[in-house]
Image (cartoon, rainbow, N blue to C red):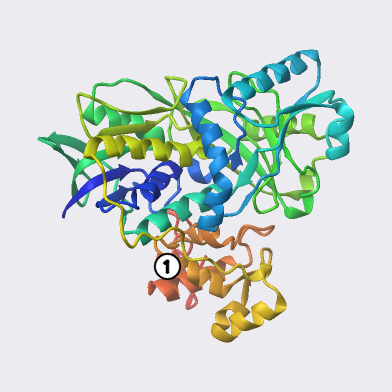
């Protein structure tokens, strides 16, 4: 199959999705190629969900500039795209005089970067605001603009908005080669060839591989694994802010923070690995994370852990984001090395890439029928009793609770399936509708979600996957019933 477009974006993580959403305002053809079977299936689904204030990155870097600019965009952006977001502020805690010197350095760096309202607080004030922190803390850097967001929901929202505005999404389309032909690029995938005037490389840990298909090797992406704990909402009063320890050359270190959905997330560690998709957790790694987190808050309740997971970060050899075009290959743009604060920076560097695209094509025409936001979702458990009654009158599926941990209704699950770029797997439902995101982690609602997916997609129950196409849940029938 052959497809001809103006712009092809490789990768449907938060970078590719943000850029697709931004470019969807123009009267041009755009497609997104994703090797996985869903949006946000790489680093964008497995990270801390922190919108950083911007004091950590070195002044003058892309990380510093885009972090601060992106942070300021989040409130309006998440309101427009209906994404969970809360500006809760962060503390970097100090345990000794050397740490206090680090806080002074971070404050000065943040002020250089343009971060507003940074303040170093005394231990007394810190413990008034966060009584469950280590009593040995002697001070903290407070950044009120730091926030939490649901990273996979943001990526999905960006992509849904882009598709609403005409962008084409091709899942399970790994790029095998890119051939420069005259004034266009031919992108080879297993089942189609895409001809594009412009290619934007947002391939995450494989961004160097994609770059090398077009240009001589110029950078390397190292895979760095980080492991996490997720605690139940019953542990939610342990901390009210994002709690960091002083950073090291390995990153920002292990944090303890509420999530956008009021759980507590703890992590990550930082382990360089050779296999770029080795997302298993390890006893050693999780032990390291928990031990480090106890230094921040010795009262962390181990009996409230509901799951563990890991994510892979794209560590660039350059030490900074690689976002640029090239004189020798007009129309090819790298968006590579998007490690932390990549999530915080995505809305800002999407605008920068937009400028690069405008430079290449010239002035682009705005769509007359451009849709600014995306269709609002119904969050049934947040509604008043009167609002719930009205919704159920219109659609009785909203009166049937499927996920008791998160109070998610069948109506919400069906809506998550039938939206643009909707859920096709159990984890896809979880990322869009929170079903299976609570204490039981889908233990009770999982079989019912299989039934709903099979019914709504008109597929056999045996074809329903947990996440990847290889992760089948039902493998055989026993005594006339499907066996899990």
- Specify few, some or many for label 1: CA neighbours under 10 Å numbering under 14, 14-19, or 20 or more: some
On the question of residue 48 being in view, the answer is no
- Name the residue tied to disc 1: 462
Describe residue 30's horizontal placement relative to residue 224 as left or right: left
State the image coordinates of residue 480 (x, y, percent, origin top left). 47, 78
When asked about the image quadrant of residue 112, the answer is top right
Please tell me which residue is depicted at 43% across the width and 33% down the height of the picture.
276
With 282 as the anchor, is 101 left or right in this view?
Answer: right
* Image: 180 above or below 372: above
Q: Residue furthest left?
A: 182
Placement of the N terminus among the 4 image quadrants:
bottom left
How many numbered marks are there?
1
Q: Please give the name of the residue rendered at 74% of the width and 54% of the height, measured from the top-left corner.
A: 233
Q: Position of residue 166 (x, y in %)?
A: 31, 59
- In front: 378, or 462? 378
Residue located 34% across and 48% down the image: 23
Q: Is residue 367 above or below residue 479?
A: above
Relative depth, front residue between 188 and 440: 188
Q: Vertically, is 447 above or below 203?
A: below
Residue furthest to the bottom: 393
Residue 229 falls in image quadrant: top right
The spot of residue 87 in percent (x, y) is 67, 45
What is the secondary structure assignment of the residue under circle 1?
A: helix
The answer to whether residue 336 shows anywhere in this view is yes
Residue 399 percent coordinates (x, y) = 62, 80
């Amino acid at each position: 199959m052959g497809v001809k477009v103006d712009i092809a974006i490789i990768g449907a993580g938060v970078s590719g999705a943000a850029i697709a959403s931004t470019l969807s305002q123009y009267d041009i053809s755009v497609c997104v190629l994703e090797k996985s079977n869903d949006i946000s299936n790489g680093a964008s689904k497995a990270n801390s969900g922190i919108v950083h204030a911007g004091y950590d990155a070195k002044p003058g870097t892309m990380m510093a500039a885009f972090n601060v600019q992106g942070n300021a965009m989040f409130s309006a952006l998440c309101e427009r795209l209906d994404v969970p977001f809360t500006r809760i502020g962060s503390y970097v805690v100090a345990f000794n005089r050397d740490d206090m010197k680090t806080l002074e350095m971070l404050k000065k760096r943040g002020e250089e970067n343009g971060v507003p309202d940074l303040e170093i607080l005394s231990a007394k004030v810190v413990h008034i605001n966060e009584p469950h922190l280590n009593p040995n803390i002697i001070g903290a850097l407070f950044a009120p603009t730091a926030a939490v967001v649901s990273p996979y929901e943001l990526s999905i929202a960006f992509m849904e908005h882009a598709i609403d505005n005409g962008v084409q999404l091709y899942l399970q389309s790994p790029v095998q080669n890119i051939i420069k032909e005259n004034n266009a690029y031919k992108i080879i995938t297993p089942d189609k060839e895409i001809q594009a005037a412009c290619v934007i490389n947002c391939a995450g840990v494989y961004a160097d591989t994609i770059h090398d298909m077009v240009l001589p090797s110029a950078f390397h992406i190292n895979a760095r694994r980080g492991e996490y704990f997720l605690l139940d909402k019953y542990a939610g009063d342990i901390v009210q802010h994002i709690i960091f320890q002083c950073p090291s050359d390995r990153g920002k270190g292990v944090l303890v923070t509420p999530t956008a959905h009021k759980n507590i997330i703890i992590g990550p560690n930082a382990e360089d690995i050779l296999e770029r998709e080795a997302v298993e957790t390890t006893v050693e790694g999780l032990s390291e994370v928990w031990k480090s987190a106890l230094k921040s808050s010795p009262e962390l309740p181990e009996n409230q852990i509901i799951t563990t997971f890991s994510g892979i970060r794209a560590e660039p050899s350059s030490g900074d984001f690689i976002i640029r075009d090239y004189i020798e290959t007009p129309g090819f743009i790298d968006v590579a090395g998007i490690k932390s604060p990549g999530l915080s920076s995505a809305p800002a560097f999407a605008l920068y890439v937009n400028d690069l695209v405008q430079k290449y094509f010239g002035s682009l025409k705005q769509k007359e029928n451009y849709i600014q936001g995306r269709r609002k979702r119904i969050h049934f458990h947040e509604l008043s009793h009167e609002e719930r009654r009205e919704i159920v009158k219109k659609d009785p599926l909203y009166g049937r609770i499927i996920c008791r941990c998160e109070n998610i209704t069948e109506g919400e699950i069906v809506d998550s399936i039938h939206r643009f770029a909707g859920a096709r797997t159990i984890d896809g439902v979880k990322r869009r509708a929170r079903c299976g995101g609570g204490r039981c982690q889908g233990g009770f609602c999982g079989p019912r979600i299989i039934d709903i997916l099979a019914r709504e997609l008109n597929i056999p129950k045996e074809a329903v996957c947990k996440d990847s196409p290889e992760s089948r849940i039902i493998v055989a029938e026993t005594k006339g019933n499907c066996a899990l």
